[in-house]
Image: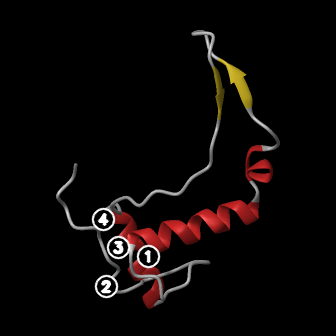
Amino acid sequence: MSTKKPIRVKKWIRSGELNPRNRTQASILYECGGLLDSACSHEILGGDVLFEGTDGKHYVITVEAVIGRANPEYVKDILLEDKE
């Protein structure tokens, strides 16, 4: 079990289609799930995806959102872009 405190948003730089009122990881990921549902995985993946692996088990592909640390170069580029 992780003892780290969940990250909260201090300030949005860009929120895309997300509601900037969201401040917690849970609320952001919940909204992402809704956006992905409304986009329909079928549209993203081009239909149902199901395959059998060499281990004889069946697998599907899911589309999901995760929160990860931003690359410093990406942050620099976005901040410079916003200044222009």
Label 3 SS: helix
Q: Nearer the viewer, mark 2 or mark 4?
A: 2
Which residue was labeled with disc 1? 78
- In-image side of 77 versus 33 (left or right): left
Q: Residues within 10 Å of mark 3 (few under 14, many from 20)?
A: few
Horizontal and vertical percent for residue 52?
68, 17
Residue type at mark 2 is: Lys
For residue 72, the mark is 4
Horizontal and vertical percent for residue 79?
39, 81
Residue drawn at the location 40% of the way across and 69% of the way down: 25
Residue drawn at the location 34% of the way across and 73% of the way down: 76
Label 2 SS: loop
Label 4 SS: helix
Residue type at mark 1 is: Ile
Q: Within the image, what quadrant is residue 17 found in?
A: bottom right
Task: Say above or below: 74 vs 84.
Answer: above
Horizontal and vertical percent for residue 80?
40, 81
Q: Residue furthest front?
A: 1
Q: Distance from label 2 to label 3 (Cα)?
A: 18 Å
Q: Distance from label 3 to label 1 (Cα)?
A: 6 Å
Q: How many marks?
A: 4
Q: Nearer the viewer, residue 27 or 71?
A: 27
Residue type at mark 4 is: Pro
Q: Within the image, what quadrant is residue 34 found in?
A: bottom right
Which residue was labeled with disc 2? 10
